[in-house]
Image (cartoon, rainbow, N blue to C red):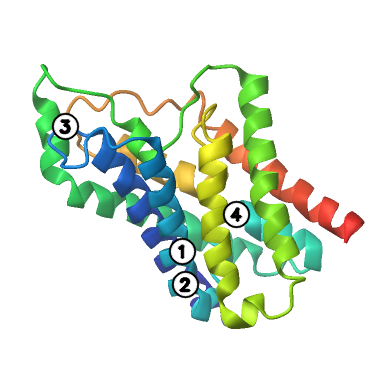
Amino acid sequence: MSNGDIFLGEVIGTAILILFGAGVVAAVLLNFSKAKDAGWIVIAFGWGFGVMAGAYTAAPLSGGQLNPAVTIGIAIDTGVWDKVHIYIAGQIVGAMLGAVLCWLVYYAQFQANADEKIAQPTLGIFSTAPAIRNTVANLMTEIIATVALVLPILAFGLTKGLGVSGTAILIVSFLVVGIGLSLGGPTGYAINPARDLGPRIIHALLPIPNKGTSDWGYAWIPVVGPLIGGALSGVIFNAAF
């Protein structure tokens, strides 16, 4: 894979991931959305479908990693680091692009936030926030949830035929749904630094009326936690498998 293909694949795939993921949260949370109050199960499946669509689209170009934590875990497993920065750059740019696309899709609903009577904070559409703000607990949650993502992804590579058939991406998509349902309650399961940081930057920049804070004091946790989780997954996989 060329550097250009890797970068382009990760941009496109991660943009699709965030368009679906942020889009389903916007659908559930924003006033005047037809899916208003559809609930957590809808959000979990929306993110899973986003992973599926993004990864299948990016796979021919870059392999469809779409997540710096996955990229770090694979690099630790294989010992190949020369393209890690290209993957991560593409993922962050793609996440930012996907956030902009979500804003455009729900532009009218975001503009309705100008009405003070129904205005609501919008950060939760773009990035994560903890249900209970506790630095140690929040960081542990993101580390553990990311290991629950990346370690199985590495192990799936040991099952002959999954990668060739393309079934591995489908299984990872359901894995993301499962993580959302089981482990997403405490922090909103970022499990992906690009997924959280890129859209948070866009949230800070977009002219959304009454959008509220971008919560930069918390922003390091959904970046550092998944990176630690991805690294631990690579170490555990090398040691155990």
Q: Quadrant of the N terminus?
A: bottom right
Mark 3 residue type: Asn
Residue linked to disc 3 = 31
Q: Which quadrant does the C terminus fall into?
A: bottom right
**Residue 68: assigned label:** 4
Q: Which residue is mark 2?
A: 56
Q: How far separated are the C-alphas under marks 3 and 4?
A: 33 Å
Is residue 205 rendered to the left or right of residue 209? Answer: right
Which of 121 and 200 lies nearest the eye of the viewer?
121
Which residue was labeled with disc 1? Answer: 52
Instruction: Confirm or deny contact between disc 3 and disc 2 (CB under 8 A).
Output: no
Query: Disc 3, disc 4: CB below 8 Å?
Result: no
Please tell me how crowded label 2 is: few (under 14), some (14-19), or many (20+) other residues with Cα within 10 Å: some
Q: Residues within 10 Å of mark 3 (few under 14, many from 20)?
A: some
10 Å neighbourhood of mark 1: few (<14), some, or many (≥20)? many
**111 versus 153 height, above or below:** above
- The picture quadrant where one finds residue 26 is top left
Q: Residue at x 43, y 25 (%)?
A: 215
- Quadrant of residue 201 in the image? top left
Q: Point out the frontmost of discs 4 and 1.
A: 1
Residue 209 appears at what percent x and percent y? 17, 29
Q: Mark 1 is on which residue type?
A: Met
Rendered image: mark on residue 113: none
Q: Amino acid at mark 4?
A: Pro
What's the residue type where badge 2 is placed? Tyr
Q: Secondary structure at mark 3?
A: loop
Of 49 and 196, nearer the camera is: 49
